[in-house]
Amino acid sequence: MAINLRKKSKPQAVELGETGSETADVQGLSQGQIIRRRFFQHKPAVAGLIFMISFAIFVYSASGLHLGTPKQPFSIAGWWPATITDTFDFSACASGCPSAAHPFGQDSIGRDYFALVTRGAEISLMVMVVIGSLGGLLGTIMGSVSGFFGGMIDAVLMRFTDFIITIPAILVGAVIGYKAGNLGVLPLAVFLGLFSWTGLTRLVRGEFLSLREREFVDAARVAGASNRRIIFKHILPNSVGVIIVSVTLLLSGSILTETGLSYLGFGVVSPDVSLGLLIAQYQDSFNFAPWLFWWPGVIIIAIALSINFIGDGLRDAFDPRQRRKIKKKDFLMKASTREAVNK
Amino acid sequence: MTTNEPILKVENFNVEFWVDGVWYPAAIDMNFEVAAGEVLAIVGESGSGKSTTAMGLMGLLAPNARSSGSVTVKGVEMLNQPAHVLRKFRGKEVAYIFQEPMTALNPVYTVGFQIVEVLRNHFEMGPAAARERSIELLTLVELPNPVQAFDKYPHQLSGGQRQRAMIAQALACNPALLVADEPTTALDVTVQAEILDLIRNLKDKLNSAILLITHDMGVVADLSDRILVMKDGLTVEEDSSANIFNRPKHPYTQSLLASVPKLGSVAVRTLDSVATKANPVLEVIDLIIEYPKRGRIPAFRAVDGISFAIQPGEILGLVGESGSGKTTVGRAAIGLLPVHEGSIKILGNDIAGAKMRDLRELRKYTGIVFQDPASSLNPRLPIGESIGEPLFLAKEAKGEELNRRVEDLLDSVELPRSYRNRYPHELSGGQKQRVGIARALALSPQLLIADEPTSALDVSVQARFLDLLQELQDSLKFACLFITHDIGVVDILAHRIAVMQNGKLVEVGLRDQILNKPQELYTKALLAAVPVPDPAEQKKRREARAKLMAAAGK
């Protein structure tokens, strides 16, 4: 009964997103304002954004900030008492299962798994953000310039791209990791970012090649727009769909690259951890200590999902054709249920 | 079955589309018949449901459509039949000619292959026999060099030739019913006249029933036997061709007829004598423009030594077929194309070889309206921002001031102010073109270049658009280079007319002089090709045109 009641009272909250904007229609809104408004009307995207921000704050505050190189560490402790190197005895649970003292459980040598997972998530997030933003930025700029100007600039940039593509990133990553493994994770992430822009460049260039021939580009030029304005204001928003899909894939892919390198022993080196490393280490423990596998796994899935939702929301916000309307059918359905409640 | 049995019989035909949970009717209670050898024209503006009706006959609608009623072809019910039944009729008994031959033909197959495919789908026929029959068909549609054309790809043919190939494909199986959906809308006036001639000849030769879909009353004038006028999915009027043209009953039919530009029906527009003495706004001297060579394709000279000038407040109509170089002139005049030789002076400043910065300065005095409103507005930019961009970039207005100017501009092109937050795809073609004008006029330019602004519009929308442009020109007094392929359009607007052919100016003169006493044969041919919405008059014009073409051939 209680469940029924709650279900009936819920539909009262009618979304007013679209109708509420009616008054705003008379004022002039810029592209940016409209995109922002549309993004915040996209519920999954906002949920994803809130999750990502709160998760990052939670993780960073729990395990603290870790800067500097492994040789000269500089860190600020978080609110969680245990660190990734402390070992505890198995007094709470003989198998190391989650308990009050160790909410995420303990690993095989007695380390606090919550500390490991938060620290791992911190590093994975950092790697992802660095690779994603560096790869996304470089790819977008290289592709835009190459596609927009064409000719010699295009030829040179594209041959350079081909050259980068021919180098297997994992191999160079391994070499760099081996030579400079003691530099820490950040330089490695930067380095991987420098090698991950090639696919995006190709896609963006293709988009630009077709979009620059459209008449609205001529129209902008006639209006007195500079090349920079045409690229960033006119053409780029039209290729945002491709960029977002590609960067979303790049972000999820960067976790895998980092995991692969760590698995080979060249990426994140012990005692440091990352989510990928944790999964790689404990993939066999699925039967006897499943929490060792589940915590990092679930967190990776949650991160990847929220990135996808944010990407969806951005793409829809940039694409004016994706107008979300309240369906008439929905209105009717809501009206009828409300009547039923009144009776 | 008697000979009087109609080929196509449509009864209580309804089409509805499912959009956002509601069924929207697109065609309501259609009833019509077409007999063998008869041409029924369905006329209406875009959105009136005429194409939906044509596609719905053979179940070619989108998956979100439903249709009801009855459609019989040669006595066999077509509506809601399984696909294998329809397939036997499609192509064989009922053939379609589409609007845009470039997209309706598959670009990766030769024209011949596509005709052979239709033939071999429906008949037991060997490749050699099919090839022979295809060449026969290409000859029938008067395609030059049919044997060579058989092995050509669609992009190697001109627009008119492609449409001929489409017609040959449609005729492959001697269809009992030919549905022509806007067959000439994408073509020039002169090519349109040729295609209409062809369809007329074929009608007599093949004795097929023809269903012609068009928005242009001029096109149907002497081709159709009966006309059905549609508006908002409803049949407004159906009658014989002569009755519709001479005694239209419904006001909508009357307004459709009135919106077709008639040559010489408007009073002469005169210029103030003071204006003509002033310095020209645009002066083009011995202009040559070449598209540089690319790989094995040699350089192409699109404009070859033309000279003309436009005085303040004057509208010069630049007329020519597609490929004559008129658009190239327009784009060069606004600095979008490099000048090969000669000079273009805007307000006395030469833009040939000018630097980017100097060009940007001059752009404050010029505006351009592009041909295709769908492509000339940035799809991701709300139209208010598109209109305001020239003002913003010229640093004329910002913030509140910019908002106010955009509102004024929207008012001046008669669009509601609330439209400023809409995206281009939410506007109709005519509205988008108004936005195009508003943007071009944002900086109150002294020179407006209009590059075929009406060619993507319906006739009735075109008429309203031209009225608006004329009003604006009367109040703002800008000079205008109006580029078009339709002489009927410049007739309404222009003070002077320049005719272009193959990159050269053929004739320049005052409007009356060009329209009434054309000196050059080419101008005469162009004039004769304009269809007139009056069957008797059009018949006379057609015969006169045939004589003219015969004389030109000698």
Image (spheres, grey):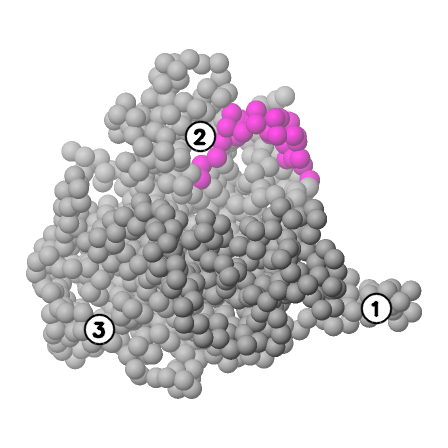
Instruction: Decide which of tag 2 and tag 3 comes sooner along the chain.
Output: 2
Which image quadrant: the N terminus of chain A?
bottom right
- Chain to which the residue tagged by mark 2 belongs: B
Same subunit: marks 2 and 3: yes
Task: Give the amino acid type for the residue marked by disc 2 in the picture.
Answer: Ala
Dot 2 surroundings within 10 Å: few (below 14), some, or many (20 or more)? many
Residue B360, label in figure: 3
**Residue A181 point in image, percent of width and height:** 39, 59
Residue B170, label in figure: 2
**Residue at image coords 59%, 63%:** A117
**How far apart are the alpha carbons under marks 1 and 2?**
63 Å
**Residue at image coords 49%, 17%:** B123
- Chain to which the residue tagged by mark 3 belongs: B
**Residue at image coords 43%, 82%:** B403
Query: Which segment did they paint magenta?
Result: B69-98
Residue A6, label in figure: 1
Q: Is residue A194 visible?
A: yes
Task: Give the amino acid type for the residue marked by disc 3 in the picture.
Answer: Arg
Determine the image quadrant of residue B66: top right
Determine the image quadrant of residue B33: top right
| Residue situated in front as seen by the camera: B505 or A308 | A308
